[in-house]
Amino acid sequence: MGDRYRLKKLAFDQVSTYSLKERHHKVSRGTFADPRRWDETRDVVGLLPEILKATDLTAVVEAVLAARSKGKPVIWGVGAHVFKVGCSPLLLDLMSRDLITGIAMHGAGLVHDVELALIGATSEDVETEIGSGRFGMAEETATAINGAIAQYVPKGLGIGEAVGRALEEGEYPHTDLSLLAAGFAQALPVTVHVAVGTDIVHMHPSTDGALVGEGTYRDFQRFCSMVSEIGDGGVYFNIGSAVLLPEIFLKALSLVRNLGHPARDFVTVDFDMIRHYRPSVNVVERPTRDSGRGYSITGHHEIMLPLLYHMLRSRLEGAP
């Protein structure tokens, strides 16, 4: 039977080859994970292969330590999920060790942080409560947040500082779990960026929309001041915010560059469970396109953040 396609048969026996030993290889045994390192150090960091995202994670750790050695900022934009999976104590410890110099959160983070300070628990069961109209109607949460805004925003404070001051100076049994309280106590800026109508406290009659807007705008101004110092080696993390904080970071970056600040040659990092458009584009890609480096690290926060913390502490304390 003839070849109905009328194609010329190729002479495979004339293919040229070369030795495997001459080829460039992307991985080799020297870069592999080696369980013998555990026997030597008892340190999980030593088990990471020097390949792909493990290399990126190591580079992120080095960037943080390099930034602090130069006195450059390390700013964390923190989504609500960080609180909901129990990782805020890790951030509190890094703040105390001067490895975080500023934090930005949106209104959901504010709610969770305050509830943790109030009762040491947070994250209501929306599916259970939404049918009855009880979702978001916890009185103490709204009273604490809206009360702090009403008391201190008229005195010139932003929402982050206002609530942090109220928590730190008030009678709250679990302020050791609060990033806002720790920020106020340490004079470390913690800013809150609110989209009106997105947070449960906005449903309560104690909300003053004008003061919320005034307070969150002050926090945007403060956040811009933080970003203005990020050039030449600073680091910005976006941890689990898919929309709001990536947009705010990009606008802040444009503003400070417009004002003449040399906000270039820095590192950005997006940590999240799945990849999203805005963090990828507005945090990792666009800000570092002409200088610096952006990293995307994908994984569950309750696993990846303890790993990042461990790596920072290991390097900082000179673990073998």
Image: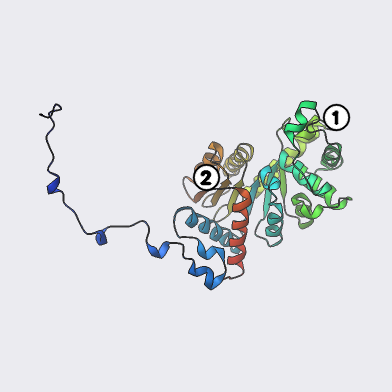
Q: Label 2 neighbourhood size at 10 Å, few (<14), some (14-19), many (20+)?
A: many
Circle number at residue 115: none
Indicate how the structure is coloured in the image: rainbow
Front-most of residues 19 and 218:
19
Up the image or down, 132 lies above or below 289; here it is above
Residue extending farthest right: 171
What residue do we see at 48% from left, 49% from top?
291
- On the image, numbered disc 2 is attached to which residue? 284
Tell me which label, 1 or 2, sits earlier in the chain.
1
Front-most of residues 174 and 251:
174
Per the image, label 1 sits on a secondary structure element best described as loop
Up the image or down, 202 lies above or below 74; here it is above
Per the image, label 2 sits on a secondary structure element best described as helix
Up the image or down, 9 lies above or below 268; here it is above
Q: Residue 312: give x, y in percent of width and height.
A: 60, 62
Q: Residue 142: give x, y in percent of width and height.
A: 83, 37
**Residue 263 seen in render:** no
What residue do we see at 37% from left, 61% from top?
28
**Residue 142 seen in render:** yes
- On the image, numbered disc 1 is attached to which residue? 205
